[in-house]
Image (tube, rainbow, N blue to C red):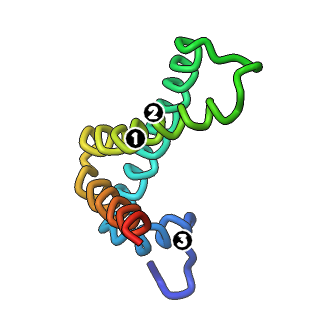
Amino acid sequence: MPSGEKSAQPWLGKMQEKWGLETTRQVLLVLAVFSLSGSSVVWLRKGLFHLLGYDDTTPMWLKTVTYILFIFPTYQSLLLVYGFLLGQFSFFWEKEKKMFRWIAAKFSK
C-alpha cells in the first residue's frame, strides 16, 4: 500500500497483528468461528432451557448455574469444532490452552 494510503478496514490489520495471524483471510475465518460458535450456543441454550422446562419463573441462579455448567464448555468445544472445519484449529487450540492455564492458576491459589 503506498505511503499515506489508509486501509479500508484498519481494524482487520489491528486484529491480525494482535492475534498473530498471517493474513486478513485468517482474521475473517477466526471472526466467522466466533460468530458460528456464539450463534450455535444461543440456539443450544434455548433448546436446553426448553428441554429442562425453564421459563420466566425459573430462578436466575438456576439458569446461571446451568449456563455455566453446560453452555460455557459447549461454547469452548464449538470454537474448536468450527475452528477445525474452517482451518483455524491451531489458533483456537492455543487460545483454549492459555485460558485453561489461566483458570487453573486462579484455582490453585
Q: Which residue is mark 2?
A: 70
Q: Which residue is mark 3?
A: 7
Left or right relative to 52: residue 95:
left
Give the amino acid at mark 3. Ser
Q: Judge depth for marks 1 and 3 and give the one in front.
A: 1
Give the amino acid at mark 2. Phe
Quarter where residue 74 is shown? top left
User: Residue at position x 44%, y 78% from top?
Assistant: 1
Find numbered disc 2 in the image and state the secondary structure of the residue it sits on. helix
Give the amino acid at mark 1. Pro
Left or right relative to 65: residue 22:
left
Residue 5 position in % (x across, y down): 55, 79
Q: Is residue 41 shown above or below 24?
A: above
Quadrant containing the C terminus in the rendered view: bottom left
Dot 2 and dot 3 residues touching (CB under 8 Å): no
User: Residue at position x 40%, y 41% from top?
Assistant: 73
Front one among 106 and 96 = 106
Q: Is residue 43 shown above or below 86?
A: above
Q: Is residue 48 shown above or below 89?
A: above
Dot 1 and dot 3 residues touching (CB under 8 Å): no
Left or right relative to 97: residue 10:
right
Q: Which residue is mark 1?
A: 73
Residue at the right extreme of this rendering: 57
Q: CA distance from mark 1 to mark 2?
A: 6 Å
Find numbered disc 1 in the image and state the secondary structure of the residue it sits on. helix
Q: Residues within 10 Å of mark 3 (few under 14, many from 20)?
A: few
Q: CA distance from mark 2 to mark 3?
A: 41 Å
Q: Residues within 10 Å of mark 2 (few under 14, many from 20)?
A: some
